[in-house]
Amino acid sequence: MRISACVIVKNEEENIARWLACVQQIADEYIVIDTGSTDRTVELAEQGGARVYPFVWCDDFSAAKNFALEQASGEWIIFLDADEYFPNKVIPKLKHRLQEYHPNRKIVGIISRLLNIDKDDNNRFMGAVGQVRVFRNMKSLRYAGQIHEHLLNTAQGGRRLQVAMEVEIYHTGYSQSLIQKKLRRNLRILQQRISQAGEQVEDYLYLMDCYFGLGDYEKAIEYAHKTIDSKISFVGMDGHAQDTLIVAMIKQQRPQEEILRVIDMAAEQYPAAPEYPLRKGILYWDSREYLQAQACLQRGLQMQKTVDAKATVCMEDNARRLLPYAYMYLGKLAEMQFQPQAAAEYFLQGLEIYPYEQKIFACFYQSIRGNTPADIIELLNQVYDKKEDAAFLADVLYQNQAGKVYLYYAKLAGCGEKGTHAYLAAGRYDAALICLRDELDSLYRLGILSAREKGIAQDTAALSLLLPCKYKEAWGELCQDKENVSMVAEILQRMQKEIMMFGEKQEQPI
């Protein structure tokens, strides 16, 4: 069984090495279609053993992908985007599925779970959809659609796609630093085509996504309704329009009753989807209807376990990104009911799903801070990598006044030996005061010098309100003759003496 890995690229030097490292574990040839890169993408691809073909970009993703298929000689195609990859643990599972499906000619492709990951936010899970990224190399299978291209099978007779939920793909292309540019590009292409051929039913969902991602929630709501009313279906994306509609209404701060009605209608259409009771639970929490919130959140969590057990990717998975917050709110509800152990367990479950949510971390830490520092560190090391996550832990622990626990991770992160944070955590308030005094002195002087350089002496009232008395005197003198450099130096020297005298008075321990 020969396998071809294909990709279309433009300026993907940040991702191409990871793409190659992924497909090299399973494919026999690597085909890169370059649509006009000006960075090192082509060079890196060729160094990695790929065959690179130029393609003149024509605002048509299907045309570029079909060109790639024409170059492929394998019996199976793996067509990931440059910002997509199989985690290492998934590769053996994919190999097993291909060996299983290869003899059955009726199976022409695999529906995998594609997880959208925000790499700008500690790989936060953003949602999951079913996608076909692995399929047979057949003349009857070709892409259609300028953007959001999809496979069409023109062959007759009993061909099917096989669901393999365990074959997960990570996609980083929706990270915040990247998504806006892509959405503007997609909207431009859509609008150009619509101006020539008119708006088609299949455009509704793509327009909805573009407007939602660009923050035009009114337009997103309009096209979400059009998508739902059209009853058009996309493989692996059932419920996507409903979820977008609900979130857009929440973003617009629509009345709660209106949002709840939409949630209930979506739940009628998809009664097994856990996201709808979870959404209701969070809305009830926000409106302080705690009993309803608790009931909905618990029902949603139970439904999610059932969904996971069924292992289907036909429904878009929007519930998983709500789970950490569902656990957080249930933890807070447990605290209200004087159940500290249950609260800590809920917070911990939320962190296990998304360890880098600072609000959940703060709740968890407050629930366990009565333990010894050694016990707290042991608990945290069950969730985090104490070396790789040391900087994150040091930051959030300092915010939560974690004392010796903070010092432990700050030292691992290389930032804990000195400084205000470390002195405060160690209870050395005298040393912390000296550090803060020096920092404040620098800020005062920088403020005065910046104002002088920018010639804003006339705005003395605003700046002088922030200054201690001695600095106000210096500022007043500076304003009288802001061009006198020697006078500025003298003032700064006097300010420095005042600071040193202030420090000598304050160096006794608090």
Image (cartoon, helix red, strand yellow):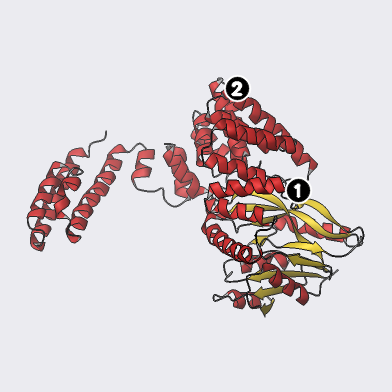
| Residue drawn 57% across the image and 45% down it | 384
Q: Quadrant of residue 94?
A: bottom right
In the rendered image, residue 430, in percent from the top left (x then y), is placed at 27, 39
Q: Describe residue 5's horizontal placement relative to residue 487 as left or right.
A: right
In the rendered image, residue 226, in percent from the top left (x then y), is placed at 66, 48
- Judge whether 233 appears above or below 505 on screen: below
In the rendered image, residue 122, in percent from the top left (x then y), is placed at 55, 51
Label 2: how many residues lie within 10 Å, few (<14), some (14-19) or many (20+)?
Answer: few
| Residue drawn 30% across the image and 37% down it | 429
| Residue drawn 13% across the image and 46% down it | 472
Secondary structure beneath dot 1 equals loop
Earlier sequence position, callout 2 versus callout 1: 2
Q: Quadrant of residue 243?
A: top right
Label 1: how many residues lie within 10 Å, few (<14), some (14-19) or many (20+)?
Answer: many
Q: Quadrant of the N terminus?
A: bottom right
In the rendered image, residue 237, in percent from the top left (x then y), is placed at 71, 49
Residue 305 is at least partly visible in this image: no
Q: Nearer the viewer, residue 404 or 472?
A: 472
Residue type marked 2: Leu
- Looking at the image, how many numbered discs can be counted on the residues? 2
Residue type marked 1: Val
Q: Describe residue 117's horizontal placement relative to residue 474 as left or right.
A: right
Q: Describe residue 275's horizontal placement relative to residue 508 as left or right.
A: right
Identify the mark at residue 313; answer none if there is no mark.
1
Residue occupied by mark 2? 291
Q: Nearer the viewer, residue 90 or 85?
A: 85
- Judge whether 309 appears above or below 183 on screen: above
Residue 482 is at least partly visible in this image: yes
| Residue drawn 70% across the image and 35% down it | 267
Tell me whether circle 2 and circle 1 mark residues in contact (CB < 8 Å).
no
- Judge whether 245 appears above or below 449 on screen: above
